Image (cartoon, grey):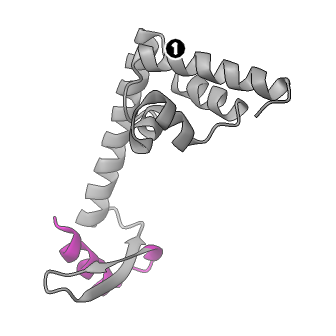
Amino acid sequence: MDFASDCKRCEECEELSKKVSGFWDGVDADGNDVSGCFYVCDNSECAIKQERDRKISEGKSERLRVSEQNEAAGTDAGKLRKMRREAHCTLKTAAEIAGISVGEYSAMECERQVIPMNIFEGMRFVFMLMQKMRENGRK
């Protein structure tokens, strides 16, 4: 299945449960502006819905695998996110401190990527210092 044909099939489909779930835009191969809608429906016989459901299921399985690896390594995505928020630190700042991209840091907090222990321990120390500085009136 490819994106363009899926969008066209959804646009033309007359499924009663079909709802707009978002919008997309871009440029085609000829440089022309193109745009359209993303749709969702409840038709379990629809091949597009089946493929989307399969990808969602795979994503959940991947997050579970990452979560189990984090737990085995002694790291915790939820704890990392909580510490960052309590330190009033943005994702961008945390990523810069860790020396990685914002996307990579976000992927660790959202359990799409395993958290290396050195990053977890280093960020825990940094967030603790940031919080203490805030408590002492320094930003």
Tell which of 136 and 4 is nearer to you. Answer: 136
From the viewer's perspective, is residue 5 above or below residue 139?
A: below
| Residue at image point 43% right, 14% down | 117
Q: Is residue 131 left or right of residue 99?
A: right
Asked if residue 45 can be seen in this view, the reply is no
The answer to if 29 sits in the magenta stretch is no
The answer to if 20 sits in the magenta stretch is yes
Tell which of 90 and 5 is nearer to you. Answer: 90
| Residue at image point 70% right, 30% down | 87
Image x and y of residue 136, in percent: 85, 23
From the viewer's perspective, is residue 103 above or below residue 86?
A: below
Q: Is residue 92 left or right of residue 57?
A: right
Residue carrying label 1: 121
Does dot 1 land on a helix, a strand or a loop?
Answer: helix
Give the position of the N terminus as an image quadrant.
bottom left
Q: Residue furthest front?
A: 138
Which residues fall within the magenta stretch?
1-22
As shown in the figure, which amino acid type bears the numbered disc 1? Answer: Glu
| Residue at image point 17% right, 67% down | 2
Q: Is residue 77 left or right of residue 49?
A: right
Asked if residue 57 can be seen in this view, the reply is yes
Circle count: 1
Tell which of 97 and 91 is nearer to you. Answer: 97
Give the position of the C terminus as an image quadrant.
top right
From the viewer's perspective, is residue 40 above or below residue 78?
A: below
Task: Tell me if mark 1 has few (under 14), some (14-19) or many (20+) residues whose alpha carbon lies within 10 angstroms of its own.
Answer: some
Image x and y of residue 85, in percent: 67, 35
Image x and y of residue 47, in percent: 23, 64
From the viewer's perspective, is residue 86 above or below residue 126?
A: below
Q: Is residue 87 left or right of residue 24?
A: right
Image x and y of residue 97, in percent: 50, 30
| Residue at image point 14% right, 86% down | 30
